[in-house]
Image (spheres, rainbow, N blue to C red):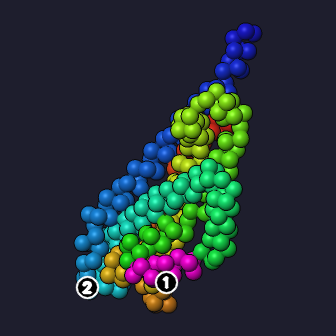
Amino acid sequence: MAEAVMAMLHAPRQRHVANRRWTFVVIVIAAVILVATVVAGFVLEPAAMRTDLAQKGLPPSFAHPFGTDQLGRDMLVRTVAGLSPSIRVGLFAACASSAIALILAALAAFGGRRADAVVSWLIDLMMGIPHIVLLILISFALGKGFWGVTIGVALTHWPSLTRVLRAEMLQCRTSDYVTAARRLGVSQARIIRDHMVPAILPQFIVGLILMFPHAILHEAAITFLGFGLPPEQPAIGIILSESMSYLSAGMWWLAVFPGIALILVVLLFDAVGNGIRTLMDPASGQE
């Protein structure tokens, strides 16, 4: 009887450990696939530009799993090479945008009422402007290209994370343990290091990672519209844009496989973000 009771008590803990281990495995697998995609994109970029008119317009086959395009370029190679710049744009843009969000949130939380009002006004202003329109204007003003798109995405994706981090900092600043630390004479720098950073770190990391899929999708969108990466560079947005002219000819594979690949990359980033959130949140780790 006692053994049965002990087994029942240990069962939830065993499930909790198993869930966390499985979540960690999913994160590692997704991260490895994403890194491998970026590396493979660099390696395959010259092959993605190579044309062979004798092989043009071939449907999916064993030799060409994604088929070939109107210039005889292998679509599998071209898709992998096209995902690499999208992921790199997402990496740089998400990191820069998260840094902007952290700085503005700290300014709002510790800069007084006027600073908080200015930051809140900026958040409302940015969220009130159509996202894709602002992104296109910034990218076009900066000459488009890789860095134009990256800066445009970075300057338009910080408001939501800023709002979350600001709320967390304000809640932490008014908490009982921070008030007690101030009355005990603890310095502001130590309060930020020992209390603020641990309080906002999970939200910051999860927000950073979940910003990747948004950045990748917006890069692909403006590239598709002609305001992003240059047409001579293999990119998912360019591949999808070029495929529109050939769908009526029955070359469906030019859009279907690159589109599915883009969705899978976004889902991988989403899996990493949700997995890290689960590991950092004890309550969700038991689900």
> x, y (%) of residue 132?
57, 77
Residue ID for mark 2: 54
> x, y (%) of residue 182?
64, 33
Viewed as shown, does residue 57 lie left or right of 237?
Answer: left
* Disc 1 residue crowd, few under 14, some 14–19, many 20+, Cα 10 Å: few
**Is residue 102 visible in the rendered structure shown here?**
yes
> x, y (%) of residue 277?
59, 45
SS of the residue under disc 2: helix
**What amino acid type is highlighted by mark number 2?**
Ala
The residue that appears at 39% across and 63% down in the rendered structure is 88
Question: In the rendered image, which quarter is residue 283 located in?
Answer: top right
Q: Is residue 59 placed above or below 160 in the rendered structure?
A: below
Q: Earlier in the sequence, mark 1 or mark 2?
A: 2
Question: In the rendered image, which quarter is residue 200 located in?
Answer: top right
Name the one closer to the observer, 93 or 19: 93
**What amino acid type is highlighted by mark number 1?**
Leu
**Is residue 250 visible in the rendered structure shown here?**
no
Residue ID for mark 1: 225
* Disc 2 residue crowd, few under 14, some 14–19, many 20+, Cα 10 Å: few
> x, y (%) of residue 142?
42, 79
Name the one closer to the observer, 256 or 269: 269
Q: Is residue 139 magenta?
A: yes
Cβ atoms under marks 1 and 2 closer than 8 Å: no
Q: Is residue 169 placed above or below 127 in the rendered structure?
A: above
Q: Over which residues does the magenta segment extend? A: 132-144
The residue that appears at 36% across and 81% down in the rendered structure is 230
SS of the residue under disc 1: loop
Q: Quadrant of the C terminus?
A: top right
Question: In the rendered image, which quarter is residue 23 located in?
Answer: top right
Q: CA distance from mark 1 to mark 2?
A: 30 Å
The residue that appears at 71% across and 37% down in the rendered structure is 175
Q: Is residue 107 placed above or below 138 in the rendered structure?
A: above
